[in-house]
Structure formats: C-alpha cells, structure tokens
Image (cartoon, rainbow, N blue to C red):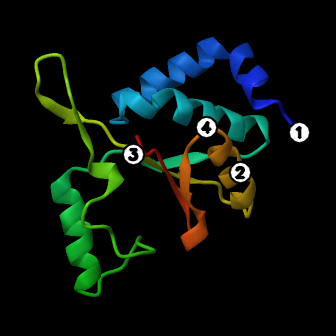
Amino acid sequence: MIDFSAYLSSISNDVSQWASYLVSQGLSKACSRAMAGFYLLLHAYGMRPVITSIYRSPEKQAAMRSAWLAGNRQGLRFLPAKNSDHCHQDKNFFGLLIPGSYAMDIDLGTKQYSDAAMIAHSLGLSTGFEIGDEVHYFYRP
C-alpha cells in the first residue's frame, strides 16, 4: 500500500505540472491538484488511466442528453445529467466565464475501478462507482 501523502509530496512538481495541464483542458483550479494527484496515483498503482472527458459546454451536454432521449445511445452509458459537473464554469481575472469542470472521466480499461474509487475517496474526490458509472470522478466544493 502506498502512503498517498508521502508519495504526492515526493512528486510535488509532477502534480503541479499535471494540475496546470488539466486546467488547460477545462478542469477547475479548485480541484486540479486533487485530480492530478489522483491521476498520478493511478499510474503508481500500475493502472493505465485514459482521460476521456473533462469539460463539456452546456450545449454539448444538452445535445448528448437529447440524443439519449431520442434513442441514440452510442458512446453513452447513462442518461447525461441535465446539470453536469462537466459543465461547471469558473470566472477568470476579468470576471468572464471560462471552462472549470468539477468532473473528469477516466477509462482504466480494466476492472480496477474499486481500487480507483478508494484512491479518489482518500483524496476527497467523489466517484460514480457506486451507481455503476465507474469512469466518473468529481469534486464537490
């Protein structure tokens, strides 16, 4: 078992770089370090995480929801939420809205999702594991 805090302290620069990258992809700064640490811990456990979704515009989310309701469920496992954590927006320095997702979908390609959920919970993140959406990891401020 890896001591999460000690491990993340030892790779603090990597966590910072990944956090910056995730913010550039639309993740909120509020959860970027926890999500970056989570992603790096998955690697430390020998998993091969693939990020499949971070930010979605409200328009894209609505289109995904409409497609599901119309019977087109290709690429979707669940009815997309009306108010998704993927659509959250932050305000920048000028007060303008910018992407600031509180969620990230990560495909592990294996059945190690229960281990991933345990790691996520230890970092203060929530998961969709309990409802069968094991690729969904999110932050509640």
Helix, strand or loop status at disc 2? helix
Mark 4 or mark 3: name the one nearer the start of the chain. 4
* Snapshot quadrant of residue 29: top left
Viewed as shown, does residue 129 lie left or right of 47?
A: left
Q: Assess disc 1: are there few (<14), some (14-19) or many (≥20) residues with their C-alpha within 10 Å of its C-alpha.
A: few
Query: Where does residue 115 sit, x and y in percent of width and height?
Result: 75, 54
Query: Distance from label 2 to label 1 (Cα)?
Result: 12 Å
Q: Which amino acid does label 2 sit on?
A: Met
Label 1 vs label 4, nearer the camera: 1
Q: What residue type is labelled 1?
A: Met
Query: Distance from label 4 to label 3 (Cα)?
Result: 13 Å
Residue identified by numbered label 4:
39
Viewed as shown, does residue 28 lie left or right of 104?
A: left
Which mark, residue 1? 1
Residue identified by numbered label 2:
118
| Residue at figure coordinates x 25%, y 72% from the top left | 65
